[in-house]
Image (cartoon, rainbow, N blue to C red):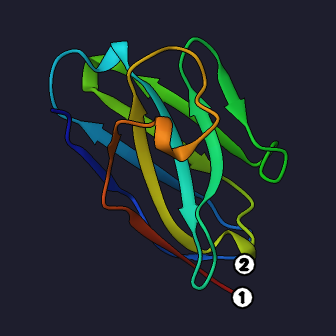
């Protein structure tokens, strides 16, 4: 059993920056790969980024979002810079037992409750 808790969301102005955190319980967090997803109102969840044996960032946010992890703190981060209004969403992190990048949401084993990002213009 792994518990994931996201934090760092809130109100940010367009063009501003925000760093989201995904804190995990347990001591074996380094054995999990972690992805970030976001879901805006009335839209399906959208894959954003992933970190495991390597990092992967979707083209839609490439150059603006950076994913990283600190295994000593059992935490994965999503740094967002030059935030745009279309980035507003509830951001979820999810953990997968394996180092290969999952291609489906169903391949992730644990999910956090999410943290909301609101972008003001």
- Give the mark nearer the N terminus: 1 vs 2: 2
Rendering coords of residue 121 (x, y %)? 72, 88
102 or 117, nearer to the observer: 102
The quadrant in which the N terminus is found is: top left
Which residue is at 36% across, 43% downward? 22
- The residue sitting at 48% across, 43% down in the picture is 106
Q: Does 22 sit left or right of 120 as displayed? A: left
Residue 85, label in figure: 2
Location of mark 1 (residue): 121
Q: Are marks 1 and 2 in contact (CB under 8 Å)?
A: yes
Pick the residue in front: 91 or 13: 91
58 lies above or below 91: above
Instruction: Determine whether, in the image, residue 19 is placed left or right of residue 42.
Output: left
Nearer the camera: disc 1 or disc 2: 2
Taking the spot 44% from the left edge, 55% from the top edge, the residue there is 92
Marking on residue 14: none
Give residue 48's position: percent from left, percent from top: 65, 48
Where residue 100 sits: x, y (%)? 58, 16
17 and 22: which is toward the camera: 22
Q: Secondary structure at mark 1?
A: loop
Few, some or many C-alpha atoms within 10 Å of disc 2 (few <14, some 14-19, many ≥20)?
some
């Amino acid at each position: 059993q792994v518990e994931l808790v996201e934090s760092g969301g809130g109100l940010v102005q367009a063009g501003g920056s925000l760093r989201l955190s995904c804190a995990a319980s347990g001591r074996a967090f380094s054995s999990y790969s972690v992805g970030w997803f976001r879901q805006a109102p009335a839209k399906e969840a959208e894959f954003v980024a992933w970190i495991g044996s390597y990092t992967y960032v979707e083209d839609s946010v490439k150059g603006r979002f950076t994913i990283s992890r600190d295994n000593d703190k059992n935490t994965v981060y999503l740094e967002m810079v030059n935030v745009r209004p279309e980035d507003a969403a509830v951001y979820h992190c999810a953990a997968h037992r394996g180092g290969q990048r999952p291609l489906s949401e169903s391949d992730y084993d644990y999910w956090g409750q999410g943290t909301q990002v609101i972008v003001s213009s």
